[in-house]
Image (cartoon, rainbow, N blue to C red):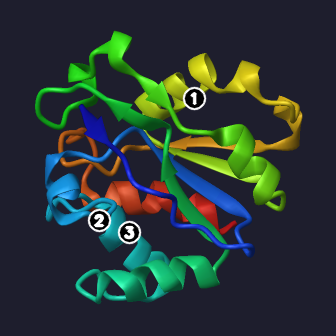
Amino acid sequence: MHNGFEPIISEAARMLILGTMPGVASLAKQQYYGHPRNAFWPIMADLYGISPEADYQWRKEVLLNNGVAVWDVLQSCNRQGSLDANIERDSIKINDFAGLFARYSFIGRIVFNGRMAEKLYKKHVLASLSRHDGEFEYQCLPSTSPAYAALSLEQKTEAWKAIKL
């Protein structure tokens, strides 16, 4: 059983970026998007002017200072390796979104880091929320995972620039 992380979040959060579940390298490092080839931190570096090699705490602070929160749809699951396709569907436990949205009520935008995060959220979370779907702006962007190789880093970065609009 793999267990995810607490959210990177503050009272200033206006946008929530949702992944599926940390991969093996991220779990080992205890850092969101900890795989050295994951494009998340290089993209955030481009968008928010931080070095992807900067201290993890500093990178988190820069996101928080820009109203960006990070979490995953899944709290825990069984999975061989890091691929979302290997998640055992009957082992899925979803994070407490109702509690998160009650506490951080200024979140108005949810950005999915890849289609699997969006699919799991819509299937397991959306119907359970007391807030109406229309109260959030939703956007699905290309996965930053190195397993998603259909786009280059430059193409992914260009797509992710939409979060700064």
Describe residue 100's horizontal placement relative to residue 161 as left or right: right
| Nearer mark to the viewer, of 3 and 2 | 2
Disc on the earlier residue, 3 or 1 = 3
* Residue situated in front as seen by the camera: 117 or 76: 76
Which residue corresponds to mark 3? 43
Which residue corresponds to mark 2? 31
- Give the image quarter of residue 23: top left
In the rendered view, tell whether residue 110 sits above or below residue 89.
below
Amino acid under disc 1: Tyr
Image quadrant containing the N terminus:
top left
Task: Say if residue 60 shows up in the picture.
Answer: yes
Describe residue 37's horizontal placement relative to residue 124 as left or right: left
Measuring 24% from the left and 25% from the top, which residue is drawn there?
78
Task: Say if residue 107 shows up in the picture.
Answer: no
- Give the image quarter of residue 9: bottom right
Tell me if mark 2 has few (under 14), some (14-19) or many (20+) residues whose alpha carbon lies within 10 angstroms of its own. some
Describe residue 163's horizontal placement relative to residue 113 as left or right: right
Disc on the earlier residue, 3 or 2 = 2
Residue 134 appears at what percent x and percent y? Answer: 87, 34
Measuring 64% from the left and 26% from the top, which residue is drawn there?
125
Residue 105 appears at what percent x and percent y? Answer: 83, 57
Res. 121 mark: 1
Amino acid under disc 3: Ile
Q: Secondary structure at mark 3?
A: helix
Describe residue 94's horizontal placement relative to residue 77 as left or right: right
Contact between labelled residues 2 and 3, with CB atoms less than 8 Å apart: no
Measuring 21% from the left and 53% from the top, which residue is drawn there?
27
Distance between mark 1 and mark 2 Cα atoms: 22 Å
| Identity of the residue furthest to the top in this view | 90
Image quadrant containing the C terminus:
bottom right
